[in-house]
Amino acid sequence: MFKHPGVVLNMSFSSELRVRFGKVRAVMRGEGVQALYSSDEAALRYLTGKDTGRLLVTGSGAVLWVKGVYRELYAGTYGSSGYPVEVREYDKDAVKDYLRGLGVRVLGVSSPALVDAGRKASRARVVVSDAVKLARAVKTKEEVRLIRKSCRIAAAGMRKAAGVVAEGVRELDAVAEIEAELRRRGSEAAPFGHGMLLSSGAGSADIHANPSARRIGRGPVVVDLGATYGGYYSDMTRTFGVGPLTRQERDVIVLVRRLRDDTIRMVRPGMLASTVHRSVELAITEAGFRFHHLSGHGVGLEIHEHPSFSPDNRVRLRPGMVFTVEPGIYLPGRFGVRFEDTVLLTRRGCVKLT
């Protein structure tokens, strides 16, 4: 079994990439796209093992153009046995000349930002393709392995949080200790890139509250963190009670935690993402509160990936998808509560990874 790109590269790594290309090409065929062009970092990481360059995927091959310095720096990746991408040195006309020589009629691009570049570089009809996004939504066994490791690191960080979140401690001081623990455990980046969320008191009702110099006082404290391993994210949230809680605070904590567990048990392959969201929203509404955000999101090479669990997303859930389940209740000026886990959907249901 190979370790993540940049650590060990061998034939298994190239085999993993071929599986990923196969998934992308299957979606391309369904879209009627003959070639796919991308310079998105996550798409490049997914298909080449590195996040630089310009990639063109066809029905039978793939070409990556990179600057000379990266071709040398990443020679270990690009030269690995069986590597399924032809790597060329980039110049400003290289992609255009190659595309026009292909003579494709329909060119897919991985994001709307690339439409103009695609039109300038080819004579084809240019469409935005979801091929990479949809392929990435269903993880390979190797991707699941990396995400599991990322989740174990996140769980260690949350155990640290349970020990440092206490009355009188500054939020920023607690965060410093928790993030240091995540790094010691092997996280390649601060949670979510910008750092973890920790909010206490009335601040816990702010869904995306950043930690501050405020000292933690009595009441719920929301801690939202994750790790990165092999480029793969994890995401989890817990709400800690500090000091004596009011009856309502205790009741809301029990309600949200139970709703998270019930939702994880409920989800099955074939369900619509919108069905999951509406179930969470209904439970919170029936309890007399309002729900203010998505009930979950995909997790992988990006912290927020396809699918999103929104009221209008009719994507059907499939085994191999990794996503969060995160109900929350927020009472502005008073307190907030959220519980969140990263889960893997299998044929039998969800498996908690955090």
Image: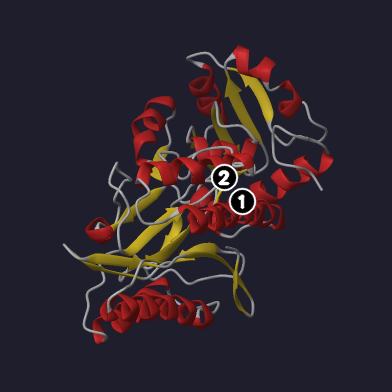
**For residue 233, side relative to residue 253 (left or right):** right
User: CA separation, marks 1 and 2?
Assistant: 6 Å
User: Quick one: label 1, few (<14), some, or many (20+) residues within 10 Å?
Assistant: many
Can you identify the residue that label 2 sits on? 182
Decide which of 56, 201 is in the foreground and name it. Answer: 201
State the mark number for residue 153. 1
Q: Specify the color scheme.
A: secondary structure
Image coordinates of residue 163 in percent, x first then y, are 51, 56
Q: Say whether residue 275 is visible.
A: no
Image coordinates of residue 329 in percent, x first then y, are 29, 71
Quarter of the view holding residue 71: top right
Q: Secondary structure at mark 1?
A: helix
Residue at (56% x, 24% y) in the render: 98
Q: Secondary structure at mark 2?
A: helix
Decide which of 335, 339 is in the foreground and name it. Answer: 335
Do tag 1 and tag 2 residues touch (Cβ < 8 Å)?
yes
Location of the C terminus (image quadrant): bottom right
